[in-house]
Image: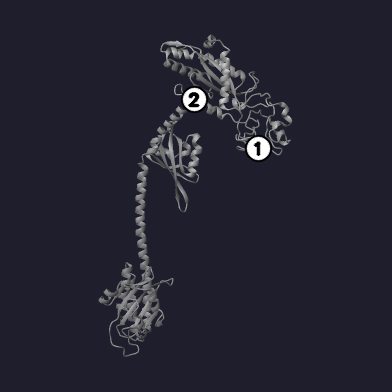
């Protein structure tokens, strides 16, 4: 560099500096930018050798670009110097503002460190400001935040002298612009890598969406996507062809519905639990023709990491055949294979569902219940002040069985109240609900103090006090035994006997009300459960059923006749199902023995 006092030299240097800085901004990649930096130093700033040592992610510096000597470039480009060695160099020698100059008199200690270096031979300097071959000049490059980006190394000024103030400032300015260019180049490279990565991710996403679309649309079983949250929660957003075929509705129509609009009313609770928690459920969905089909629903909540659940993915599998088979198996297990009536096990199950272990107790009226609660009548089910009424006072009618209102009447039995108890709850008829086993003061099925509490809302089954109709309604158990059936079986064979049993079952079923149970115990024994009957009603029913059985039954062109003997028992809480059936059976045999054999056949 010439003497800086000469203005034209400064102007020429500024022009060269402007030109090389402009070239820095035209580089297209980081590698091009680095090479442009070193070429600009050699061309524009008057140095014969220049290189850029770039900081790597691990902190060490690598020779990333070299200019001025092809042999030196081939030797040291790509070599790495440790961060510690570079930090040592940047603290030695003389500080020229933003530059670091290490004269040969101090730099000899650096000959053996691991920083790549290249020196040319030459004579010893004759003047104080003459450049020595082992002099070192570094221009550190920093990012805007103060982070070290790299170091520019220069050697052998063309004029053979150490740079003056103007030359130093020009190199410092160039290093500052080079740092900006390198930062921009890195930013562009990072953006390009990000764009490439984003494009790949988008391609993968498009491929994934296409795979999902094909798997969704062409799945052999039904699939649906439903909205989660908001006013339209549960609305079907998308359905595949298999689900449309299963429900007999086009996709455009299904988008107006949610699964809660299509589910069978009895299965709505199951659907809501499955929709809220995910998982699997078996329920019925309505078809366009008004029928229902059994399906298995498997729900998966598709969530967004930031926004939470987004939608519900539902897999709908047609299980109609399997469910029909299961129902057939269940029906076979609980019904007689010959007549189709409930069998003995099913009869005992239905009867046991109406009974509890608590002995029969007559309900109190609403007023008496309140008196017992607030006036401190018997703490643990004692009769209290109302015990004189007895345990079997008259009932005007048992509305819980017959479907009508329960009239006030009867006597106070076990209340189960404590002195500080609240009054009994009342059912919709206005009658107080008697505490169930396990309620406070009421022994549960397992003994005192056991069972759920405070009330299980069990409607206790009561029985008339005698065969005289006193207005009490209860669960009548009619035990039927056919008269003369054995002779038909022996005489005409089991085929005829089976036909007679089938016809008797039909006549019994026809003769009872909807909701009553007709069951076959086995052989020629049948049982009828009829709820809400008084003593006179049960006797009338037995007569009607006997008269229905008497008419001849035609089998293979032959008329045969059987009679029937009926015994009327009554189910009551405190009894087991076997005890109830045994009681009705005994009454049947008493009735059978009271009639002559001829009268039995005639009914």
Is 142 on the left-hand or right-hand side of 229? left
Q: Quadrant of the N terminus?
A: bottom left
Q: Position of residue 248 (x, y in %)?
A: 40, 34
Is 343 on the left-hand or right-hand side of 169? right
Q: On screen, 41 above or below 567?
A: below
Whole-number angstrom distance, CA of label 2 to CA of label 1:
38 Å
* Residue at the disc numbered 2: 343
Q: Is residue 19 visible?
A: no
Q: Position of residue 568 (x, y in %)?
A: 58, 19
Which residue is located at x 37 percent, y 46 percent? Answer: 212
Which residue is located at x 71 percent, y 39 percent? Answer: 420
Q: On screen, 131 above or below 358?
A: below
Specify the farthest residue to the bottom.
126
Q: On screen, 545 above or below 71?
A: above
Q: Who comes first in sequence, dot 2 or dot 1?
A: 2
Q: How is the image coloured?
A: one colour
Which of the 4 image quarters holds residue 419? Answer: top right
Compare residues 43 and 118 and report the one nearer the observer: 118
Q: Position of residue 278 (x, y in %)?
A: 47, 44
Q: Disc 2 on helix, strand or loop?
A: loop
Q: Disc 1 on helix, strand or loop?
A: loop
* Residue at the disc numbered 1: 440
């Amino acid at each position: 560099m010439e003497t800086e006092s000469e203005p034209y030299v400064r102007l020429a240097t500024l022009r060269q500096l402007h030109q090389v800085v402009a070239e820095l901004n035209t580089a297209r990649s980081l590698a091009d930018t680095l090479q442009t930096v070193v070429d600009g130093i050699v061309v524009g700033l008057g140095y014969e050798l220049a290189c850029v040592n770039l900081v790597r992610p691990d902190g060490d510096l690598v020779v990333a670009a070299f200019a001025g000597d092809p042999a030196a470039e081939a030797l040291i480009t790509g070599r790495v110097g440790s961060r510690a060695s570079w930090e040592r160099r940047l603290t030695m020698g003389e500080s020229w503002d933003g530059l670091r100059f290490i004269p040969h008199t101090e730099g000899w200690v650096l000959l053996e460190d691991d920083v790549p270096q290249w020196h040319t031979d030459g004579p010893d300097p004759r003047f104080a400001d003459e450049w020595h071959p082992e002099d070192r000049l570094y221009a550190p490059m920093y990012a805007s935040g103060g982070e070290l980006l790299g170091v520019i190394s220069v050697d052998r000024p063309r004029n053979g002298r150490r740079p003056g103030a103007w030359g130093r400032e020009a190199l410092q300015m160039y290093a500052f612009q080079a740092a900006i260019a390198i930062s921009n180049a890195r930013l562009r490279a990072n953006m390009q890598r990000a764009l490439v990565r984003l494009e790949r991710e988008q391609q993968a996403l498009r491929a994934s969406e296409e795979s999902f679309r094909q798997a969704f649309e062409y799945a052999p079983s039904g699939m649906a996507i439903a909205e989660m949250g908001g006013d339209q929660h549960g609305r079907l957003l998308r359905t595949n062809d298999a689900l449309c075929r299963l429900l007999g509705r086009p996709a455009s129509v299904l988008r107006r519905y949610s699964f809660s609009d299509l589910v069978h009313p009895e299965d709505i609770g199951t659907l809501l639990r499955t929709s809220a928690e995910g998982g699997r459920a078996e329920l019925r969905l309505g078809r366009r023709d008004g029928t229902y089909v059994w399906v298995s629903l498997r729900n998966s909540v598709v969530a967004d990491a930031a926004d939470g659940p987004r939608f519900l993915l539902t897999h709908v599998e047609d299980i109609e055949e399997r469910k029909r088979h299961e129902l057939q198996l269940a029906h076979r297990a609980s019904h007689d294979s010959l007549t189709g009536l409930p069998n003995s096990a099913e009869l005992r199950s239905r009867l046991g569902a109406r009974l509890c272990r608590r002995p029969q107790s007559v309900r109190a009226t609403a007023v008496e219940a309140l008196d017992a609660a607030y006036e401190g009548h018997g703490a643990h089910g004692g009769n209290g002040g109302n015990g004189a009424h007895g345990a079997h006072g008259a009932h005007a009618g048992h509305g819980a069985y017959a479907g009508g209102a329960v009239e006030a009447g009867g006597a106070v039995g076990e209340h189960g109240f404590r002195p500080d108890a609240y009054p009994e709850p009342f059912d919709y008829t206005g009658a107080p609900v008697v505490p169930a086993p396990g309620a406070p003061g009421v022994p549960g099925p397992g003994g005192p103090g056991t069972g759920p509490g405070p009330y299980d809302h069990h409607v206790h089954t009561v029985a008339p006090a005698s065969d005289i109709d006193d207005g009490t309604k209860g669960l009548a158990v009619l035990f039927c035994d056919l008269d003369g059936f054995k002779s038909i079986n022996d005489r005409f064979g089991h085929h005829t006997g089976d036909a007679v049993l089938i016809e008797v079952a039909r006549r019994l079923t026809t003769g009872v009300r909807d909701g009553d149970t007709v069951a076959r115990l086995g052989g020629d024994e049948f049982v009828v459960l009829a709820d809400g009957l008084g003593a006179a009603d049960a006797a009338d029913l037995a007569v009607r059923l006997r008269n229905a059985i008497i008419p001849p039954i035609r089998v293979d062109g032959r008329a045969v006749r059987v009679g029937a003997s009926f015994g009327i028992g009554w189910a009551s809480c405190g009894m087991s199902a076997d005890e109830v059936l045994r009681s009705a059976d005994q009454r049947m045999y008493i009735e059978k023995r009271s009639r002559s054999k001829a009268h039995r056949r005639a009914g």
